[in-house]
Image (cartoon, helix red, strand yellow):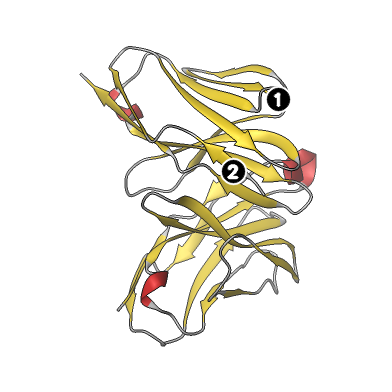
């Protein structure tokens, strides 16, 4: 089976940097994905890491360490609109099943 | 515009009355999935499909059925809904080309909030 762990809540100040961690256990790992979901909305895809290292997309970056079964999402220059839930997810390629973490609710405060 | 469309957005029904939630995507994606989202439990995969006539169970398939007769459509069927199926449901899709089969979901529908009384 597969399991992912991420913090349930994080609070950060507008303009600051926040890191959301995700550790995973999976039988067949292909990559780690991140999604953003605002209250009442649908999840939207943010990033995907298949290889070790940091991937940067604007204010958001995602990191993966396959040897540590660990990744994180880094949000810089936080804005109020970044207040949302963030989910990590992995794919079991052999079975094409997708498992999501329970999500981290990020609250950005002034 | 690339999108996944679910209908209805909101549904209140009674226990035991069969219902279908429709899902359609316009991106010619091979992979489609259904998820339910419950507080404290995150998104859990119900069923997935790798192509037409190819479906398989996710983590919480009990009480649900799916079909994939056309590539664009992937309806979710609740033959005899029960109150524990009250939840927020999402349909999702991703392509198989260019390594897409090794990625997770690319697009989600707007969600269907189902209440079973």
- In the image, taking residue A60 as reference, residue B50 lies left or right, namely right
Which residue is at the front of the view, A39 or A103? Answer: A103
User: Where residue B71 sits in the image (x, y, percent)?
Assistant: 70, 65
The picture places residue B27, in percent across and down from the top left corner, at 64, 52
User: In the drawing, does residue B45 fall left or right of residue A65?
Assistant: left
Q: Nearer the viewer, mark 1 or mark 2?
A: 2
Mark 1 or mark 2: whose residue is earlier in sequence = 2
Q: Helix, strand or loop at disc 2? A: strand
Residue A3 numbered tag = 2
- Label 1: which secondary element: loop
User: Residue A84 at x, y = what percent?
Assistant: 35, 35
Q: What's the CA distance linking mark 1 and mark 2?
A: 15 Å
**Could you tell me which residue is drawn at 49 percent across and 55 percent down?**
B109
Q: Is residue B104 above or below residue A70?
A: below
Q: Are marks 1 and 2 on the same chain?
A: yes
Label 2 CA crowd tier, 10 Å (few <14, some 14–19, many 20+): some
Residue at image position (42%, 14%) is: A76
Which chain letter matches label 1?
Answer: A
Residue B63 position, x and y percent, is: 53, 76
**Residue B117 in view here:** yes
- The residue identified by callout 1 is A66
Give the left or right position of residue A110, taking residue B75 as reference.
left
At 74% across and 42% down in the image, what residue appears? B102
């Amino acid at each position: 089976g597969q399991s992912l762990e991420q913090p349930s809540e994080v609070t950060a100040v507008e303009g600051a940097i926040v890191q959301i961690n995700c550790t995973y256990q999976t039988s067949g790992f292909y990559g780690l994905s991140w999604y953003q979901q605002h209250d009442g909305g649908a999840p939207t895809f943010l990033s995907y890491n298949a290889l070790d290292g940091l991937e940067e997309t604007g204010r958001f970056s995602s990191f993966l360490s396959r040897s540590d079964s660990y990744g994180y999402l880094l949000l810089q220059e936080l804005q109020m609109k970044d207040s949302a839930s963030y989910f990590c997810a992995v794919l079991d390629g052999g079975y094409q099943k997708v498992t999501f973490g329970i999500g981290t609710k990020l609250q950005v405060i002034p | 515009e690339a999108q996944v469309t679910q209908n209805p957005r909101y549904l209140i029904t009674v226990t035991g009355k069969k219902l279908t939630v429709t899902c359609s995507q316009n991106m010619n994606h091979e992979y489609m999935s259904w998820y339910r989202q419950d507080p404290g439990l995150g998104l859990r995969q119900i069923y997935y499909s790798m192509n037409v006539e190819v479906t398989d169970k996710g983590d919480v398939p009990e009480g649900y059925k799916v079909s994939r007769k056309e590539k664009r459509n992937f309806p979710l069927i609740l033959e005899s809904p029960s109150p524990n199926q009250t939840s927020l449901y999402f349909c999702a899709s991703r392509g198989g080309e260019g390594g897409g089969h090794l990625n997770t979901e690319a697009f989600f529908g707007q969600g269907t909030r189902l209440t079973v009384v």
